Image (tube, rainbow, N blue to C red):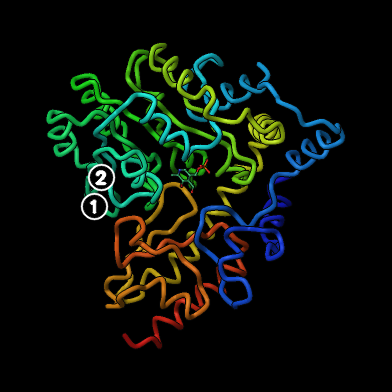
Amino acid sequence: MDKGKLQMEFEKYIDRRQSDSLKWQRYAGRDVLPLWVADMDFAIPEPVTRALQQRLQHDIFGYGVLSQGTKQAVCQWLLRRWQVEVTPSQLVTLPAVVPGLNFAVESQQLSDIGFFSPVYPPIRKVADNLNIRGRAFELKMEAGQYRMPLEQIEQAAAGGMQGLLLCNPHNPGGTIWTDAELQQLLALSRQYELLLISDEIHGDLILPGHRHRSLSALAQEQDRVITLMSAGKSFNLAGLPMAFAIVKPGGLRQSLKGWLQGRCATHNVLAAVAMETAFSQCQPWLDALTEYLGQNWRLLEQTLSSVAGVTLMAPQATYLAWIDCRGLGWETPSKVFTDYGVGLSCGTEFGAPGFVRLNFACPRETLELALSRMLKAIETHQP
Ligand SMILES: Cc1ncc(COP(=O)(O)O)c(C=O)c1O
């Protein structure tokens, strides 16, 4: 399908209300547009649908294995898109990225880890889940982008912190960390034996004019790095979960693999078909998608950037606008916007009260309606 036709596909409204969708069921029966959890209101790529339909013609869904071909498709994708050289044997299959974050920490028996703040809520929760020490590092804001507080990280590493959870590109905010920041983290990892766990699930959702910088592309073979990736976010396959950890040092990989045994179900055969097809046949779809997302972002920016009390952060990646509403003087902005018909993620869950996160992976018409409702809220709501 050519780019123009693909763009038309993204314009289509698909009714998800009766599809057991987490995103849409939250406001069931109410006139609220759900622009919160990170999945997209777009149909998955047609080649993926066809491949799934073909697999469904076989009536048996027993335990599966991941073929060499499937793993090769992941490796080729990583090389082509992320400039990461990885062999199939360096990939560890995971049920999804969030369990993978917890497993990575637990398998290495870490008792003291760090994470940036604000950040995707499940990353904040890992230390609590495992009942270990968690240190939050407030991100710095420079020229409209988040920057890493490297000095504090070094102090913590010198003081016994054993691991750092990274989100790259960062959610929320969509910042792609710079080579210099990533290199400095790697240097700290070497000096203090710090384990770096990099969640790169948004690494394919790069907006026009930017490129993903994977920690794995900069790391050396023996660096203590675990990079998590999946097709879930970029190809809208969150309900068909499957993820990978890229783990190059043999000892680290074997301990993670050993720990996973008996703790995870074998993979879902449909998820494997979907992922392989996405990585091997759907690059044009993804390119058209990121272009469409870029246009949605520009619409959002044009509509909200000059509104008093609201500050936008320009995302370099992801389809998630991170909006600082503290200037509006409202106690809980997400509640106010919900009352006006727009369901957003509340910044408090990320560690940033007064912010909201808006998922703009929806047809333009939906976004236009949501933005007009937000403007109405800003014009009329009295704190
Ligand atoms: C940074 C980040 N990691 C992980 C996930 C979820 O990954 P999974 O569904 O594979 O657990 C999300 C979903 O929004 C995310 O934003």
Q: Amino acid at mark 1?
A: Met
Image location of residue 363, percent across then percent down = 62, 62
* Quadrant in the rendering for residue 269: top right
Residue 141 numbered mark, or none = 1
Image location of residue 278, percent across then percent down = 66, 35
Q: Residue at x 46, y 33 (%)?
A: 100
Q: 26 or 38: nearer the eye?
A: 26
Question: Alpha-carbon distance for marks 1 and 2?
Answer: 6 Å
Residue 147 numbered mark, or none = 2
The quadrant of the rendering that contains the C terminus is bottom left
Image marks 1 and 2: residues in contact by CB distance under 8 Å? yes
Horizontal arrangement in the rendering, residue 211 relative to residue 191 (left or right):
right
**Residue labelled 2 has its Cβ within 8 Å of some atom of ligand 1:** no
Would residue 117 be seen by someone viewing this image from the given angle?
Answer: yes
Q: Secondary structure at mark 1?
A: strand
Between discs 1 and 2, the one toward the N terminus: 1
Q: Residue at x 27, y 25 (%)?
A: 186
Image location of residue 96, percent across then percent down = 53, 37
Would residue 79 be seen by someone viewing this image from the given angle?
Answer: no
Horizontal arrangement in the rendering, residue 171 relative to residue 341 (left or right):
left
Image location of residue 373, percent across then percent down = 50, 78
Q: Secondary structure at mark 2?
A: strand
Q: Residue at x 34, y 49 (%)?
A: 119
* Quadrant in the rendering for residue 127: top left
Q: Amino acid at mark 2?
A: Arg
Q: Residues within 10 Å of mark 1 (few under 14, many from 20)?
A: few
| Above/below status of 348 relative to 154 | below
Q: 131 or 367: nearer the eye?
A: 131
